[in-house]
Image: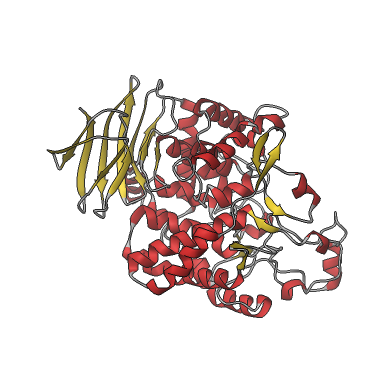
Amino acid sequence: MYSAHQQWWRAFWERSGVQVNDPVIEKYYYTSQYLFACASRAGKFAPGIWGPFITKDSSAWGGDYHLNYNYQAPYWAAYSSNYIDLTDNYDQPLLDYMEKGKVHARELLQVKGIYYPVGIGPKGLCTTRWPLTPEEMLLRYGTTENTIDSGYKFLGQKINAVFGVGNMLMRFYSTYDTGYANRIYPYLLACADFWEDYLKLENGRYVIYMDHYGEVMPNLRNRGQWRHLLGDFNSTLSLGLVKMLFKGIIEVSTFLKKDLSRQEKWQDIVTHISPFPVGETGSRLSLKPVERSPAEWLKKTTGLSRVSIHGLILPGAVCGPVTDSIFNNILLNDVAHWKDRMQHAGEWGNTLNNGIETCFPAAVRVGYDPDDILQQLKDRIALQSFPNGWITAGGGGTETLSAVPMTINEMLLQSYEGVIRIFPNWNHTKNARFSKLRAYGAFVISSSLQNRRIEYVNIQSEKGRTCIMENPWPGKTVQLIRNGKKAAALTGNRLTFHTKENELIILKEI
């Protein structure tokens, strides 16, 4: 057993690696990967909020699968880190709940598709229910009304099932695996059924009513008075994730050659869904969390933050410098103003309670200064983490394990906008290298930056797809080497070349 254990870990560490010449960052990069590998394995139950690291009789949130980010976030770095097998257990709880989700959609909203509560468990279990008696409801939530939404906690959010799609698409784009695509397609289709039915077409745009940016529920603070807070219209979380869903299902549908006749409707939704709301903050444009809301705190809130990031950037991936540089500059400016709200070091992005795994990679993706990101990350780790390497947060557990790996991976390699970018947000005066990180398109890539120069780009093409890459050597001619033999010389700001299945390609500056 011990020999098998050693062999497993040896093979695990050989699957990818980074070197950024920063001992603090590298320590937490590899410790986080280690802890996630201890928590998630193929053929085992998916980890809940605390993974297997339960240290007391009653764990917060029941240690369940919270679907409005907590369940999804621990996996985010595994895709780009080339640990695809560690994500094998992710889909099953979502698939197991589909029949109940269809009942919720039909009975509670009178629509097709699936509608999920905020928390589930394995094997079709719902973990988020209101108390069984009015007396317990009054004690815990300030009202005796324990039959809200037939006793299930949806907390004003319609987006929970689609939130689960983000990880599915990350794996699909990373592997283009036919078996996996067939496995998740019924779930994607059920989500599409729901939102085709639920969206409203008004004045040439699709709008979203009553899907809330935050959780809306009775509690002791509001003394059970909560319905006046309902009424969000066009939440950035909802708009982003719905756009992600329909972009993704078009791609998977095309790949599997299924439901091609429905693509016209899906593309119409992608094209005509409401724009993300922005408004003026002082003398600049800034993101708004919702187009409108009865909640006073949302009326006063501006700027890119954790919840909006989920819809737009991670896992939403519908925004970025390649997709829309003008809108990206608005988000980048919002990130630059995160410091305005800091009271002391370590509070950047307001990530002490939640969001370290969300805000730091998002700052990388929009192009914020990499040196400042790394310093802010180290300040945050120093302020709140355990001696064993676990970065702690107030609102959850295992999701923090993706924070450092995802941040570094995105600094060294990006591909989420359909264009592979090498060292896209890294200070090129600092040496770094990475080995066998995974990019969208089923490419496994290695590269090295030494003395301000990218030395090479090695690409293993698993599925023989066309590779689109931003020229790692701007203005220079690039030599393409196929399986050890010189092939084409490529020029231009964006390089496009065909690949074959399992082909090894090397790119070098001429």
Left or right: residue 228 versus residue 183 is right
Whether residue 385 is visible, yes or no, is no
The residue lying at 21 percent from left, 54 percent from top is: 501
Whether residue 414 is visible here, answered yes or no, is: yes
Q: In which image quadrant can residue 337 be found?
A: top right
Coloration of the structure image = secondary structure
Instruction: Return the residue found at the far front.
Output: 203
Residue 240's spot in the image, x, y percent? 56, 54
Tell which of 448 and 234 is nearer to you. 234
Above or below, 7 relative to 146: above
Closer to the camera in the image, 7 or 280: 280
Residue depicted at 75% across the width and 61% down the height: 231
Q: Residue at x 46, y 63 (%)?
A: 267
**Horizontal relation, residue 205 to residue 476: left or right:** right
Residue sitting at the far left: 485
Q: Is residue 362 left or right of residue 484?
A: right
State the image coordinates of residue 221 (x, y, percent, origin top left): 85, 54
Give whichever of 25, 192 is nearer the camera.
192
Q: Quadrant of residue 381?
A: top right
> Could you say where residue 499 lies in the image, as x and y percent from the top left?
22, 49
Percent x, y of residue 507: 23, 35
Q: Residue at x 39, y 64 (%)?
A: 252
Q: Looking at the image, is 79 positioned above or below residue 341?
A: below
